[in-house]
Structures are given as C-alpha cells and as structure tokens.
Amino acid sequence: MDSSISYGDDYKFIPATSIGSGIGIEVLPDIYCYTIQIVNICLVGRPGSNEFVLIDAGMPHSADEIISVIEERFGADSRPSAIILTHGHFDHVGGIIELVNKWKVPVYAHPLELPFLTGKKSYPDPDTTVEGGMVAKMSSIFPTDPINLANHVKELPSDGTIPHMPDFKWIHTPGHSPGHVSFFREEDKALIAGDAFVTVKQEYLYKVLTQEQEISGPPRYLTTDWVAARESVKRLADLKPKVAVTGHGLPMTGDLLTSSLHLLLKDFDEIAKPDFGKYVD
C-alpha cells in the first residue's frame, strides 16, 4: 500500500444510481463501456489480449466493481497497462487509489489536470444555482478536493499519442475542466469523448435515473468555461465521429450521432449553456 497517495478530505460515496448501472456494452470489438451508478468507464483492448487500458475510474468506492468487470472481460488477475483519465472530477477518479495500489500501473492525464491529481489544487465548487434539475441542486455534496497520485500520474505525451493506445490520439477539449481530453481513432472514427459532451441531460435527476438519451453539453454544475466548452464540441464534431462513448449516457452512433452533434453545435447556447449560473458570462 502506497501511503503517499490518497483521496481528498471530502471523498465519500454519492447516493445516485441510474437504471443503466451495472450494464456493459461492447461498442466495438475492442471498446467496452460500463456504467457505474451514473458514470461510464471504458476498456480499450480486445478480450483475449493482455494489452488493454482503463479509461477513467468511476465513482467513489467503485474499485472492487471495476476490478470484477475487468476480470470478467479479460480473465482472472488481469490488469490494464495503464489508466488514462479524461479529467479528474470525483466521478472519474473514484476508484483510482485502490486500483493504483493493487495494479501498480501508471496513470496519464493532461498537464493542466495534474494540480487536481497531485494534491495541489481543488476544483471550483459545483454551481448549485445553475439552471437545471435536482442533480445540479444536490451538487454541493460532490467532492472537489484534489486527490494525490504523487508520482504515479504522468503527463500525456505532447505529440498527441497515448501510451498503450497506439491507434488513438488525444485531443485537448477544455471547458468542463482545464485539462479535459477526448480520444479519437481516425481509422474507424471512434471517439471517447469524456464529458466534453454527454448523451443524457446530466443535471436532471429523472433523465439521469432513466438514462433518457439526448445530446447535451458537458454537465453544467461543474463546467466553468462555456466558451471553451463550445469550441471543444466544435473540435470533436469536425472529426465526424461515427461512434461516441461519453462519460454519461449511452453510446451514440451513425446518423443519430452526426445529426445530434450538428444540432448541439448549431444550438449550443440553447441546449448546453445554462440561462443562469455563476459560471455563465
């Protein structure tokens, strides 16, 4: 057990679960999306191979569930080559300390996200006043203190490559967080978007619980830069992805993805940007 790594002081279980919780979807033969409560983790690599990565690390207290999902897909005692983070919000790093202690694998993130992952800086407080439903209202209970991965976390290479994901490139997609990244594979136009955009209205409890599919911008209560958030959606839409796995909601593919991204970009201020809130211009 590495005692130099730890969660923040406000780390705790968050009581929110959707009907999708515990369900895994094989999006492509080497991309598997699994829902933990209200957030998705992603496994990239083919079953039968011992070379795969874990993208994001779920909700607080989810490490055992993540381990069992991985062992079911890749075999007993399997471990990823690395954990790659889209960003460091609590629902994307919730099981990471136990996983790093168990597997001794490196974690990679964008350099602008490192202060939040090395104990140096807290995220801004969630905006409970933002336009939206019950999840936005309850967001004051969400952890924002930095976790400390010490020397276990490394910067993603500056040339856009991703360790252990040879066919993917990372793309800086800030707005939801300063160092948010998404991952894209040109060959089949597969996109792992993180929270740059999502496919459920994450602020509304009913929609979160029922996982009603609907393109949306990044979760409002934690998004602090709406100009950057729109630019990030444009950057991803310009790639013309054919399949997208997002941090919240069901994967989206084909014409529905194309038309939804077009709509989100065209009507970003109406669909994504809240009418009021402390991070709205």
Image: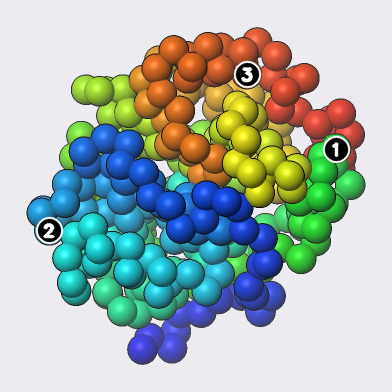
Disc 2 from disc 1: Cα separation: 45 Å
Q: Which residue is mark 1?
A: 131
Find numbered disc 1 in the image and state the secondary structure of the residue it sits on: loop
Q: Amino acid at mark 1?
A: Glu
Disc 3 from disc 2: Cα separation: 38 Å
The answer to whether residue 47 is left or right of residue 224 is left
N-term-proximal mark, 3 vs 2: 2
Q: Which residue is mark 3?
A: 264
How far from the left and from the top, in percent, is residue 217? 64, 31
The answer to whether residue 74 is left or right of residue 26 is left
Q: Residues within 10 Å of mark 2 (few under 14, many from 20)?
A: some
Q: Amino acid at mark 3?
A: Leu
Quarter of the N terminus within the rendering: bottom left
Q: Nearer the viewer, residue 33 or 241?
A: 33
The total of numbered circles placed on residues is 3
Q: Which residue is mark 2?
A: 50
N-term-proximal mark, 2 vs 1: 2
